[in-house]
Image (cartoon, helix red, strand yellow):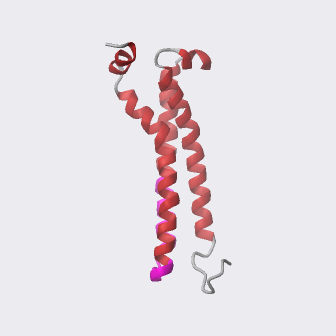
């Protein structure tokens, strides 16, 4: 068994948490970004009145998901890093996990912030223009 395989076998639960921490926030942002465009297009073409409430609910839920990835990343970073300095934690055999957790903290917080900003702009700007020109 290779050294990398033995490290993965020693703590397999960390792989899923590291993947969630690193990818969950950006994926939540992508879902919010593309979903808001779909919802606005649906509301403009069909006259659907529930756009505001749906966008607000989607913004809150996906910001919570992105925030959860930040918390998972922070907890995993504390567990992985222990009392080591940053460079020592990233250079150990499980340093990839520390890197993913640290990336998850940054990407999750940035994604949550971006989701909230995008949600507010989608709620404050008129979704449909009656004249065909952007207001």
Q: Quadrant of the N terminus?
A: top left
Name the side, left or right, on which 44 lies relative to 121.
left
Is residue 87 at all visible to an observer of this figure? yes
At 60% from the left and 50% from the top, the residue drawn is 113
Secondary structure character of the magenta stretch overall: helix
Name the side, left or right, on which 15 lies relative to 81.
left
Image coordinates for residue 83, horizontal then vertical, percent? 56, 16
Looking at the image, which residue sits at the far front?
A: 2
> Considering only vertical position in the picture, is 21 above or below 11?
below
Point out the stretch of residues depicted in magenta. Answer: 44-62
Image coordinates for residue 74, horizontal then vertical, percent? 52, 32
Most foreground residue, 133 or 36: 133
At 63% from the left and 72% from the top, the residue drawn is 125
At 61% from the left and 18% from the top, the residue drawn is 87
Q: Inspect the magenta stretch and tell me whether residue 113 lies in it.
A: no
Q: Quadrant of the C terminus?
A: bottom right
Looking at the image, which residue sits at the far right?
A: 135
Is residue 85 at all visible to an observer of this figure? no
Q: Which corner quadrant of the image does residue 48 belong to?
A: bottom left
> Considering only vertical position in the picture, is 63 above or below 89?
below
């Amino acid at each position: 068994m290779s050294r990398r395989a033995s490290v993965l076998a020693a703590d397999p639960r960390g792989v899923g948490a590291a993947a969630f921490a690193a990818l969950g926030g950006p994926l939540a942002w992508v879902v919010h970004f593309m979903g808001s465009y779909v919802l606005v297009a649906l509301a403009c073409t069909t006259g659907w009145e529930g756009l505001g409430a749906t966008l607000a609910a989607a913004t809150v839920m996906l910001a919570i998901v992105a925030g959860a990835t930040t918390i998972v990343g922070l907890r995993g970073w504390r567990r992985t890093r222990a009392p080591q300095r940053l460079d020592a934690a990233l250079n150990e055999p499980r340093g990839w996990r520390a890197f993913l957790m640290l990336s998850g903290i940054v990407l999750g917080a940035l994604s949550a912030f971006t989701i909230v900003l995008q949600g507010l702009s989608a709620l404050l700007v008129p979704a449909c223009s009656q004249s065909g020109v952007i207001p």
